[in-house]
Amino acid sequence: GQQVMQIPQYQHVQEGEDFTTYCNSSTTLSNIQWYKQRPGGHPVFLIQLVKSGEVKKQKRLTFQFGEAKKNSSLHITATQTTDVGTYFCAGPFSGTYKYIFGTGTRLKVLA
Amino acid sequence: GAVVSQHPSRVICKSGTSVKIECRSLDFQATTMFWYRQFPKQSLMLMATSNEGSKATYEQGVEKDKFLINHASLTLSTLTVTSAHPEDSSFYICSARDPRGLEEDNEQFFGPGTRLTVL
C-alpha cells in the first residue's frame, strides 16, 4: 500500500543550527502538505506544495517538492526553541481528499 | 483559518464501556470529516472518512462495529468507541477540509484531539 516515510526519526540540534527533514512517498503525489505538531498539541498546517520542483519559503522555513513528486523536504535555518515539535509531511490518496501522514521527524532544540 | 473543536478533550473510562467523541466545525460546514488515531510518539493513522448523510468509509484494519461514526449534520461528526479496552487508549483527532477554499486548497483543519484512557 501507499507509504510515506520520513527521515530522520529524531533530531536534536543546538539553537542556531539548521535542520532538515526528508519525506519520501512510495507513489507519485499530486501534492504534499507539511504539518507541525507541538508536544501535547494537534497538527497545524504549514504549507502545501503542488508543482514539480516547487520551492516555497516561510521566514526561516524552506519547503521543496521533488521533480518526480515523490519526495519533499523541510529545511529550517537557524533553529529556535519555538521550532520544537514533530514535523509531518502528508500526501493524498490518489483522487481523494484523504491524506496519509508520514512517520514524522521529532525536533528538539537545545538552548 | 477555519476552526474545528472536539469534546471531550480527555476521557477516562472503564474497560467494556462506550465512549462518544464529538467533532464540530465551528465556522464552516463540512460534508466530510476525517478521524485519526495517534499512539504516543507515533504518526497519525487515518481511521475513517465521515460523510454527512451517508455511511462512513473505514480504512483497512479498522473495525467499523467497534468505531461507530455518525455524521448527522454538516457541522458535527461523532466517533463512538464501543466496548473500549485498554488497547484502545490513544489520542483521537478529527479534521475537516473547509469547502469554501479553492478546489486545489486541501488544507486540513484539525481539532484539538481527545485523549482516551481505558482502565
Image: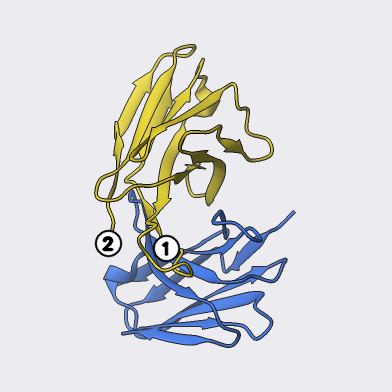
Chain colours: A blue, B yellow
Work out which residue is located at the far top of the displayed protein and give it: B16
- List x then y, in percent, for residue A20: 49, 79
- List x then y, in percent, for residue B66: 57, 22
Q: Residue at x 28, y 56 (%)?
A: B2
Dot 1 amino acid type = Glu
Horizontal side, residue A72 vs residue A63: left or right: right
Residue B15 image position (x, y, % from top left): 47, 14
Q: Which residue is mark 1?
A: B107
* Amino acid on which disc 2 is placed: Gly
Q: Residue furthest left?
A: B27
Q: Nearer the viewer, residue B84 or B73?
A: B73
Q: Nearer the viewer, residue A56 or A82?
A: A56
Q: Is residue A104 left or right of residue B13?
A: right
What is the quadrant of residue B77 in the picture? top left
Q: Is residue B28 above or below residue B76?
A: below
The image quarter in which residue B61 lies: top right
Q: What label does residue B1 carry, if any?
A: 2
Q: Quadrant of the C terminus of chain B?
A: top left
A4 over B49 or under it: above or below:
below
The 10 Å Cα crowd at callout 2, few under 14, some 14 to 19, many 20 or more, is: few
Which chain letter goes with mark 2?
B
Contact flag, marks 2 and 1 (Cβ < 8 Å): yes
Of the image marks 2 and 1, the number of the one nearer the N terminus: 2
Q: Is residue B22 above or below residue A9?
A: above
What is the crowding at mark 1: few (fewer than 14 residues within 10 Å), some, or many (at least 20)? many
Callout 2 secondary element? loop
In what element is the residue under mark 1?
loop
Q: Report if residue B48 is visible in the image.
A: yes
Report the label total: 2
Which of the chains bears the disc numbered 1? B
> In the image, what residue occupies the spot 47% across and 67% down?
B103
Q: Is residue B52 above or below residue A31?
A: above
